[in-house]
């Protein structure tokens, strides 16, 4: 049983059905009815008018969002260990035309207002120095921690105070949300988020992500930049179909809940081994090299996360009963 | 019956089967076995060692190829009406960091050595002027014309003489090839092509293209640039599976032949109305506005292509017998 | 006697005096009093509030202006033979992040509304196609032709109609202006110009150009982009001093008048040999290779301008009496 | 008396003489004899063949050097507080097309191999992560510290081991060199430096810097990139003349020695107040706000350098006897 990543999970049956249902002759690019219906569908979900720009990867959604929110000569405040900082090969720099990532520390890859405040205080105001234009946070974070609505709102207030825009990398937005007693709106625009990279691929889709713009007036620019980046698929209906299927019957929440719940027995088994609190579907656990080898010898797959540490990720595809053997093996260490 | 574009065709059943067969838990990105097998599979097809970089769109493959072949301060010779020039919203400029498209005229969007020669003769050699580094041709062209191997080889020789690299936009490479008594190698590297954007989406895939690098040493850079452009899909196995399926049993050739053959009765019916010779699966036909309206009223769909002209595109999904009514309607004008 | 370029002329004595007067200990960058006084000085000249951004080259001023007026995914309408198109090695692409130059023909490198209209009519509106954001014209043009205020105003009106900004490359703005019964305001913002690259180097300065922004609110962005481009000189007072000296006593107009007048006897001698009307300080003249060689053998220096053509440029440094021998030699051909 | 920056110093009399001597009619851009003689002149100085690319600012020289040494998808290792990191508004990102600055700590803005080693150890090798291509160090550093030849050589060896290029920002290369018993070659290419931004503006020139390429084969690309960045001045002879004058009679060393020596009495007066060792012409000194105000009230000008700290910079223009009153005032605190 693998716990490498939620990217390694298969495609959910409902997605297959939606893809098959979308098959046939239809308009190219995003001229099909499914693509055209996305703005309305997500506006309903977010309880306000939004514009949706689909793409096939979270990296493209993040980079596009930040290209909208920050000019080439500007800076983007983000965590030292954010995905956009360490795992996207400079996608932000390409999309923005060379904006600077201004990074901050924080436990569990979580930003906070005090660190943001300290970071901008170190930036001179003169033209010699990079002027910040945006903050980007990931919810859940790279370490599986969750920003609560009030935490996002505090960062949102900081942004408004300093004239910054706020982007949320929501590759695991669903995993964050199901953990909270909150709505999508509470965790995004009501807390000050301007653009949300809303991820579905890790959560059961094949290759579908939605950039949500809470200012729909930015959609034309976004769609031009998407085309320019090569992300306007010619058979876009097969992307849009996935997004509709994920929202249908709240599949996105069902899947995220499954993923998070699968992590619970692992977290309980790990106990004091946990490096960060277990909040979503990723656990960081202390295993000695011998322990890790022992577990792997039993057929459990997972990535190292630095010396003496491992990352365990559960997905919509893990059922609690499938996870039990791994939990038992951890408990038995 | 629609003749808007080969992008409007559905996904071929063999692709659906391959996608289903690829489903399951597997390595993320391009770490899966299907992705890893592509170099060998395409090396066999091209009768030499090649590196394959998959992506989801032809625009991304073209832009990536040209970013490898031309520095930011260089120029790329291409046709005035090439797809990369008029239909990709500056994707080449984004990917290359601002290289210049140096355009040339030519009937049917086809470049020839005389025009290329004339174009570079107008470029000064000093640092003030853009220095050309590459030529990009599309085979088939935007107007459905085909470069024969000797025509490509003549451009290839021109490139070698002037120190230029040669890129082929092969969104319809299959449609070109099946029209000729030639191998993939003949129409690409043997004729001097350095990088080929080998298209499959228009030819029956869902969203799969292959950038073929005839210098495999460029693969590492290509893959870093792909990631940076947001084109490394996290569930890449569903792209790789499509490529394997297209090559299996020469489906790519079968489909292209079907598409080209479907164009034959339309071309015959069009007769003198043809603006360009009918060589692949696209026809440009003179219809008066009244004629176009008359055809549309009968349920035939197609795009205008300037005043008094229409573009008719056939695909793997058109059978000759399906096309007959449209041919008859054209003949009856 | 040389007629290669107005760039080959020496530095005017008044500039030397101003540079010497500026010498001493002062604030770095543009913190000095001379730099700080430029906005007011040029606002007076232009009869409205403007912001001035100095730099050392016309290329940097042009590129900076266009980076302000056009986003990376946009297009800039310009003449096929404009300096920004053929002589700046892609500076616009670097500064804008890859915007596209959309070029138009026109006699003597002069744009007109009909050609602009035709050019944008060929651009599709969809996201696949480059959306124009600006027009750039050069006054005087690369062939020494002059746009009258009403000609600029017609282009300005076209720009307003289509939501475009208007840039003027005024490397030879002075040479254009002194030929007309018009004020700097008439030939710029009153005719719809948003940003003017106001050249002084060719007109007697050492290395000083002024980008004039008729919307001073853009100055902060412009100055950040200038710094980022490496164009904020650390001893900026030596640039600012030149600009003040050029305006003092209307030296810029005096010098331009001298340059233009020096061209008059050459134009008269050339007569029917003139390829374009003689309007400023550049003449394009038909000389056979033998004639050109004959003149060069007599010590007259000038550049070829294509087969059977030569470019003759006069500068502030040419006095009419110095030019007489060349005029006589041309007349004697 | 001002100690704000060496940029606030006037232009040295020998520079004025050289500028006047260069006046007259000459070839534009870098076609003049002075520009053409630079390669030979600097090759002599560096005891090997080098190519010289002049420009007007240190920022442009640094950015150009790094654009040569690092592709857009690569990373550049530099100190957290390097000038290229904090004081150039993202010039490296613009010139490179969005390369990433990968920063390291180190006392006094000085890099060392251990920190470099630690930094690259944290970078993954996969395409997701930025691949380093170059290291950039400043000698002297932003805090006035000096790398000895063996320290540079250690970093050079690290670079060779890891396939990285080495750039030196030598805005104060002269100030570093005169402190050492070493030649320009010892402190640059013999220690592994590939490209040196050799500064002269702070050291008595008006606006002249030299990018020294120890691989002359890179000159063509460098000159195209310089043009594209708007840094090819049209009257380049006035830049080249300054460089020749600085080398004539070792003026560059004389001036740097003067600057460094002027710092000595200030360092002695500061004593324990020094935050970093006094090695070149910049001192960082602990002054309470009251002390700083007291000194300023006596007419001494200097910048703050964070809370309770000041930066004092001496230049070629400060004579030891001019500095004495400031030293006395500091001693009297």
Image: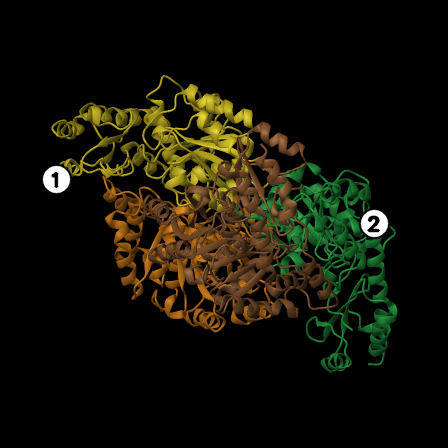
Chain colours: A orange, B yellow, C brown, D green
Q: Position of residue C302 (x, y in %)?
A: 61, 38
Residues under labels 1 and 2: Cα distance?
85 Å
- Callout 2: SS: helix
Q: Which mark is residue B297?
A: 1
Question: Label 2 lies in what chain?
Answer: D
Query: Quick one: B186 or A298, which is closer to the camera?
Result: B186
- Callout 1: SS: helix
Residue plotted at (88% across, 70% down): D321
Query: Quick one: A49 or C52, which is closer to the camera?
Result: C52
Q: Which mark is residue D248?
A: 2
Query: Quick one: A221 or A59, which is closer to the camera?
Result: A221
Judge the density around disc 1: few (<14), some (14-19), many (≥20) Cα neighbours within 10 Å.
few
Query: Quick one: C178 or C152, which is closer to the camera?
Result: C178
Q: Is residue B160 above or below residue D296?
A: above
Q: Position of residue B294 (x, y in %)?
A: 12, 37
Assess whether mark 2 and mark 1 are in contact (beta carbons under 8 angstroms).
Answer: no
Q: Position of residue C159 (x, y in %)?
A: 37, 55
Q: Is residue C128 visible?
A: no
């Amino acid at each position: 049983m693998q716990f490498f990543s939620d990217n390694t999970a298969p495609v959910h049956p409902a997605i297959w059905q939606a893809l098959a249902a979308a098959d046939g002759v239809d308009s190219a690019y995003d001229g099909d009815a499914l693509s055209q219906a996305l703005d309305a569908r997500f506006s309903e979900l977010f309880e306000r008018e939004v514009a949706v720009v689909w793409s096939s990867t979270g990296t493209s959604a993040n980079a596009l969002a930040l290209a909208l929110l920050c000019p080439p000569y500007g800076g983007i405040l983000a965590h030292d260990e954010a995905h956009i900082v360490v795992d996207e090969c400079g996608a932000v720099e390409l999309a923005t035309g060379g904006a600077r990532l201004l990074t901050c520390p924080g436990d569990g890859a979580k930003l906070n207002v005090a660190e943001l405040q300290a970071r901008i205080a170190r930036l001179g105001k003169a033209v010699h120095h990079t002027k910040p234009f945006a903050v980007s946070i990931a919810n859940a974070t790279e370490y599986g921690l969750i920003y609560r609505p009030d935490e996002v709102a505090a960062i949102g207030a900081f942004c408004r105070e300093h004239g910054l825009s706020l982007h949320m990398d929501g590759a695991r937005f669903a995993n964050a949300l199901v953990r909270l007693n909150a709505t999508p709106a509470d965790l995004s625009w009501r807390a000050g988020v301007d653009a949300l990279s809303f991820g579905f691929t890790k959560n059961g889709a094949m290759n579908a992500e939605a950039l949500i713009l809470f200012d729909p007036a930015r959609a034309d620019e976004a769609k031009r930049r998407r085309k320019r980046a090569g992300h306007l698929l010619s058979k876009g209906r097969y992307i849009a179909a996935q997004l509709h299927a994920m929202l249908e019957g709240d599949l996105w929440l069902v899947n995220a809940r499954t993923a998070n719940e699968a992590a619970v027995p692992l977290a309980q088994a790990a106990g004091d081994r946990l490096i960060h609190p277990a909040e979503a579907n990723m656990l960081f656990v202390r295993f000695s090299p011998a322990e890790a080898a022992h577990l792997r010898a039993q057929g459990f797959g997972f990535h190292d996360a630095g010396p003496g540490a491992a990352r365990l990720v559960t997905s919509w595809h893990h059922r609690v009963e499938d996870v039990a053997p791994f939990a038992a093996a951890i408990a038995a260490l």
